[in-house]
Amino acid sequence: MNKIFLFFYNLFENYIHLMKIKLFLSKNVILEDPIIFDVGSHKGKLVSLMNNLYKNALVYCFEPYELFNKDLKKNGKNIFVHNYAVGEKTEEKNIITHKIDLTNTLSQINENSFYLKIKNFISGKLNKNNYKRVKVISLDDFCRSKEIKNIDFLKIDVEGYEYKVLLGAKDIIKNVKYIMIEIQKNDMYKDYSKENIENFLKENNFILIKSFNFPFMFFKDCIYKKINN
């Protein structure tokens, strides 16, 4: 069942979902020599897309699993891979792991979730007792340490932990042009609130310019643009 699920998931992602995102970005998000942050890089599909779209881009990847480093770095010399998770503050935390690694998460699981039961049936049970200790860093701390003053495009896909990532970026968010963030449309994660994410972005002068529903899945990718007051 896992192999069948991954086959169709990758098929829809590679040839429908990511192609729609690429087409939209190519026509509506024009960036020159951009600084791009990919939080939750996994194996680097978005890294490859962005590197193809934007010449001379500097891409900072945040992915706590070192086994993905080779996949990420093969996209070019302008790719900087950091084996951290990203959150509200710099610390160490347990990340729940799964045999399908794209569902690894720092979020607390809602055991009563109907969506979780469906997901367990399709892709195998997500066991909250399977975890790995990882280093977590906030984007503000990272940017200060690297003397990064602005981010042209910030992508966040961290399985329900997106709001915590934003809370750790209260300073650098002032100098971010675009954000693409995964929004959950299910109840799999405890205390998850898309309203918190939307309110945070609104308070920091971002407006939604496009959303992409993933085919047959209960989440979407939303692109926001910073506007001047």
Image (cartoon, rainbow, N blue to C red):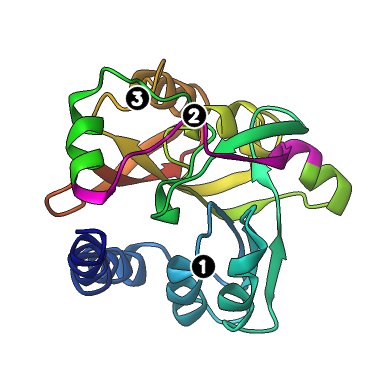
Q: Position of residue 224 (x, y in %)?
A: 39, 43
Report the magenta residues as a range: 122-141
Query: What's the CA distance linking mark 1 and mark 3?
Result: 28 Å
Identify the amino acid type marked 2. Ser
**Of the residues under marks 1 and 3, which one precedes in the sequence?**
1
Pick the front one: 12 or 1: 1
Q: Residue 132: say if magenta.
A: yes
Q: Which residue is mark 3?
A: 194
Res 25 visible: yes
Q: Quadrant of residue 79?
A: bottom right
Residue under label 1, please give it. 31
Asked if residue 83 is positioned above or below residue 205 in the image, the reply reads: below
Provide the secondary structure element on which disc 3 rests: helix
Cβ atoms at labels 2 and 3 below 8 Å apart: no
Front-most of residues 169 and 102: 102
Check disc 3: other Cα within 10 Å, few if <14, some if 14-19, many if 20+: some
Q: Which residue is mark 2?
A: 107
Q: Residues within 10 Å of mark 1 (few under 14, many from 20)?
A: some
Q: Which one is closest to the eye, mark 1 or mark 3?
A: 3
